[in-house]
Amino acid sequence: MKVKLHARNQITLPNKLVKSLNLSSGDELIAILKDGCIELIPAITIPKGEAYLFTPYWQEALRQAGNETAEGNLEGADNVEEMFQKLEED
């Protein structure tokens, strides 16, 4: 697809491309220069306080929790004290 460079170095992405990538106005893209070509990669901004959730440790923990939930291997607690008591028993 061909695009044109406009004033202030702006380009307009073809609507078909925008729709196929589920992009909308205001979305952020990362621009990478690679072998004389410009690569545009859709990006999201993660708040610094939530970045730990994307570490390998937490991704694995979330995957395991999802599996346990799907298998019905979770145990409930009626209150915080009961929850901590059950955690200490394990």
Image: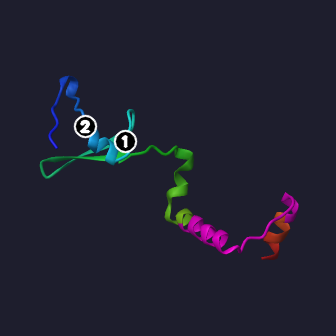
Main secondary structure along the magenta-highlighted residues: helix
Circle 1 residues within 10 Å: few <14, some 14–19, many ≥20 = some
Residue annotated with mark 2 = 13
Task: Between residue 82 and residue 70, name the one nearer to us.
Answer: 70
Q: Are marks 2 and 1 in contact (CB under 8 Å)?
A: yes
Q: Which tag, 2 or 1, sits closer to the chain's start?
A: 2
**Residue stretch in magenta:** 60-82
Q: Is residue 52 above or below residue 45?
A: below
Residue flagged by tag 2: what amino acid is it? Leu
Mark 2 to mark 1 CA distance (whole Å): 10 Å
45 to the left or right of 37: right
Residue sitting at 55 percent across and 56 percent down? Answer: 53
Residue sitting at 71 percent across and 75 percent down? Answer: 73
Residue annotated with mark 1 = 23
Residue sitting at 56 percent across and 63 percent down? Answer: 58
Task: Between residue 1 and residue 38, name the one nearer to us.
Answer: 1
Colour scheme in the image?
A: rainbow
In which image quadrant can residue 25 be found? top left
User: Residue 49 location in percent, x, y?
Assistant: 57, 46
Task: Determine the secondary structure under disc 1.
Answer: loop
In which image quadrant can residue 11 be found? top left
36 to the left or right of 75: left
Is 12 magenta? The answer is no
Quarter of the image with the N terminus is: top left
Task: Determine the secondary structure under disc 2.
Answer: loop
Residue sitting at 70 percent across and 73 percent down? Answer: 72
